[in-house]
Amino acid sequence: MTDQSDAPLTRIQQKNRDLILEGALTAFSTNGFRGATVDQIAEAAGLSKPNVLYYFPSKDDIHKTLLTTLLDMWLAPMIRIDPQGEPLAEVMGYVRAKLDMSRRFPRESRLFAYEILQGAPHLTEILGGSLRRIVDTAAAILQGWMDQGRLARVDPHHLIFSIWALTQHYADFDVQVRAVLGPGHDPFVEAEPFLEGLYRKMLAV
């Protein structure tokens, strides 16, 4: 919203803001940042362009707000990894959570992929700041379990990267996956036991 006050949003204001971000998700995930316009966002949101610009001063501001919100959601399962939990169960819980998010939020995953492929111009500070700290914390938990002999020893950062790659692939390359598998297949249902077996074999001691 343009700089007016720090007062909480009214119910209608919050509803309109949510409509704008949902419309922006449709526009950006379909056309990318460069291809999307405020007019497209307004149309997808069912609001006028001036109304959109009342809440967000620019397309850039909408995009950054949306990406920041999505990144918070994307990182939540990692933050929930419990250092006091059973190591393999915690890792498998994270894998399942990431796969489920790819199933439920494919547009969000593709939007994030678009941003990374463009060099992350709207997320540079976040990627090197809060994202890195959260990943380093999770990697330290994994490394601790490995040092205790409770997980097989692998590079913890690359373990995390592999989980991202092997789960988000099903969202980002959904058309390709479904085309190769053909009719009668649910990629997400079939992926879960495959990933379960893969990581259990990799990490079991």
Image (cartoon, helix red, strand yellow):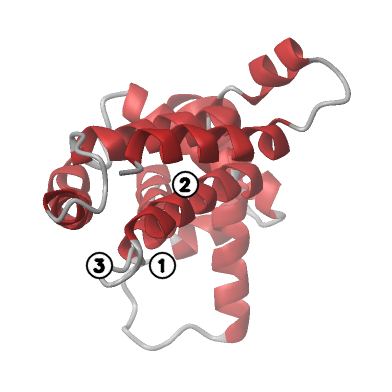
Q: Secondary structure at mark 1?
A: loop
Q: State the quadrant of the C terminus.
A: top left
Cα–Cα gap, marks 1 and 3: 39 Å
User: Closer to the observer: label 1 or label 3?
Assistant: 3
Cα–Cα gap, marks 2 and 1: 36 Å
Q: Which residue is mark 1?
A: 1
Labels 2 and 1 touching (C-beta < 8 A): no
Q: First in sequence, mark 1 or 3: give its number.
A: 1
Q: Which residue of the protein is positioned furthest toward the right in this rendering?
A: 184
Q: Decide: is 22 above or below 4.
A: above
**Amino acid on which disc 2 is placed:** Val
Q: Which residue is mark 2?
A: 95
Report x, y in % for residue 5: 32, 83
Cα–Cα gap, marks 2 and 3: 16 Å
Q: Decide: is 35 above or below 132.
A: above
Count of marks overlaid on the render: 3
Q: Residue at x 62, y 73 (%)?
A: 15
Q: Residue at x 39, y 48 (%)?
A: 67
For the residue pair 198 and 97, the one nearer the viewer reads as 198
Q: Secondary structure at mark 2?
A: helix
Report x, y in % for residue 117: 35, 22
Q: First in sequence, mark 2 or 1: give its number.
A: 1
Q: State the quadrant of the N terminus.
A: bottom left
For the residue pair 182 and 54, the one nearer the viewer reads as 182
Query: Is residue 34 left or right of 15 when viewed as pictured?
Result: left
Using the rendered image of the protein, determine whether residue 33 is visible from the camera's viewpoint: no
Labels 1 and 3 touching (C-beta < 8 A): no
Q: Local crowd at mark 3 within 10 Å, few (<14), some, or many (≥20)? A: some
Q: Which residue is mark 3?
A: 83
